[in-house]
Image (tube, grey):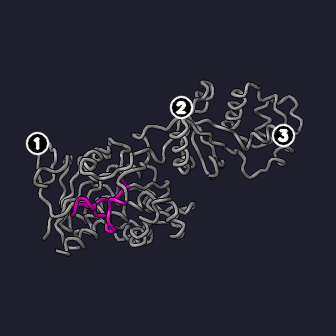
Amino acid sequence: MTDVAVIGAGPAGLMAAEVLASGGAHVTIYDAMPSAGRKFLMAGRGGLNLTHSEPLADFLTRYREAAPRLRRAVEAFPPDALRDWSAALGQPTFIGSSGRVFPKTFKASPLLRAWLRRLDASGVQFALRHRWTGWDETGRLQFQTPDGPRAIAANATVLALGGASWPRLGSDGAWVDLLAAKGIAISKLRPANSGFTVAWSEVFRDRFEGQPLKGVALTVAAHTVRGEAMITRSGIEGGAIYALSAELREAVLGLGQATLTIALRPDLDTDGLTTRLSGTRGKQSLANFLRKAAQLSPVGIGLMQETAIASGRPLASFSPAELADLVNAVPVQLTGIAPIERAISTAGGIGFEELDEHFMLRKLPGVFAAGEMLDWEAPTGGYLLQASFATGAAAGEGVLRWLGSF
């Protein structure tokens, strides 16, 4: 049997190992953490969103400019195949109302336990608390372990070390310098699916921290997303924000800030809102009037108050037409990006031009890369895990093909 080292015990590495073992390779998975799949478990804390049920052509567009480079891998291991794979592990899936796909248990831990049992039964070995530190002068893999340095000779290697988000779970981006030293072109790792900072007033921050904005439409430049967002003490985050995070991030990096426009009642047009807001307020407070006339939430009204304060005019001085305009175009100035350590995922990584069609690094024959190490990003909704699984499978197939060529 041929010895193959897989470095990284996340979804991409585990899937590569499964493909390799089924192809007859002797596989050892190395990971710096004391246990496998730590970020995978974190991803499933609120319900494990494995993939998405939308048509594959639409699915692939979620990978933006990286879609052509990921297409073959995702088509070879598409969402339906991932669902079948999960079911074979005793974890059947269901499609939620949003089209997202979840295990029926809604948890990551039963799936991971079943997966690890199957890998063990197929002969895959684990070497945990092994932090990869590069190669020695003879080409052996070097690791730092609790027992000191260790060098390992492997016939092929799959790197699946993740990005740089949630470093306490193992993906700290330390591999960047190791590969850059070998001449591998790597796009800078940046936060993806992240929150953004906003200079809220103290009153707004104290009152509305942790409050959701539901049923809103968020717009930056020509991009609009419907969904939900969450006010945080330092800014704003949530599903709709994550869906726009690439555009918002690039605007902040390029200009130092970005203007996010929030439509609080996107299903009502300006004329309809103006009519609703032209009624007599009587003795009602403005907040109560807006809540009843336009069905606005307290946090939505608070956002409008923030805009009025910034403009130097009290909100009570706005005409019905001005209020209607503001309801569906509340400007929020984003001043920065939340730290990469708190992002759900990362953008950037190994450039696809560094890889052949089988995910082998052209400058390092026998070394393959998969998962979030590669230069792609996608929104939440199952797209992140799907590409990690698919590229892991593709790298495993690539190794088998490469080994079989000798």
Q: Please report contact status of discs 1 and 2: CB closer than 8 Å, yes or no.
A: no
Query: Measured from the top left, where is residue 115 in percent x and y?
Result: 30, 63
Distance in Å between CA atoms under marks 1 and 2:
43 Å
Is residue 366 rendered magenta in the image?
yes
Amino acid type of the residue that numbered disc 1 sits on in the rendered structure: Gly
Label 1 vs label 2, nearer the camera: 1
Q: Is residue 54 left or right of residue 213?
A: left
- Report the residue marked by disc 3: 321
Q: Is residue 31 left or right of residue 147?
A: right
Q: Residues within 10 Å of mark 2 (few under 14, many from 20)?
A: some
Mark 1 or mark 2: name the one nearer the start of the chain. 1
Amino acid type of the residue that numbered disc 3 sits on in the rendered structure: Ala
Q: Residues within 10 Å of mark 1 (few under 14, many from 20)?
A: few
Amino acid type of the residue that numbered disc 2 sits on in the rendered structure: Arg
As drawn, the label of residue 275 is none
Is residue 81 rendered magenta in the image?
no
- Report the residue marked by disc 2: 233
- Report the residue marked by disc 1: 148
Distance in Å between CA atoms under marks 3 and 1:
71 Å
Q: Is residue 385 left or right of residue 3?
A: right
- Looking at the image, how many numbered discs can be counted on the residues? 3
| Location of residue 316 (image quadrant) | top right
Q: Is residue 116 placed above or below 163 in the rendered structure? A: below
Query: Measured from the top left, where is residue 291 in percent x and y?
Result: 75, 38
* Stretch of the chain drawn in magenta: 353-374
Residue 377 appears in view: yes
Residue 22 appears in view: no
Q: Nearer the viewer, residue 139 or 268?
A: 139
Q: Is residue 258 placed above or below 365 in the rendered structure? A: above
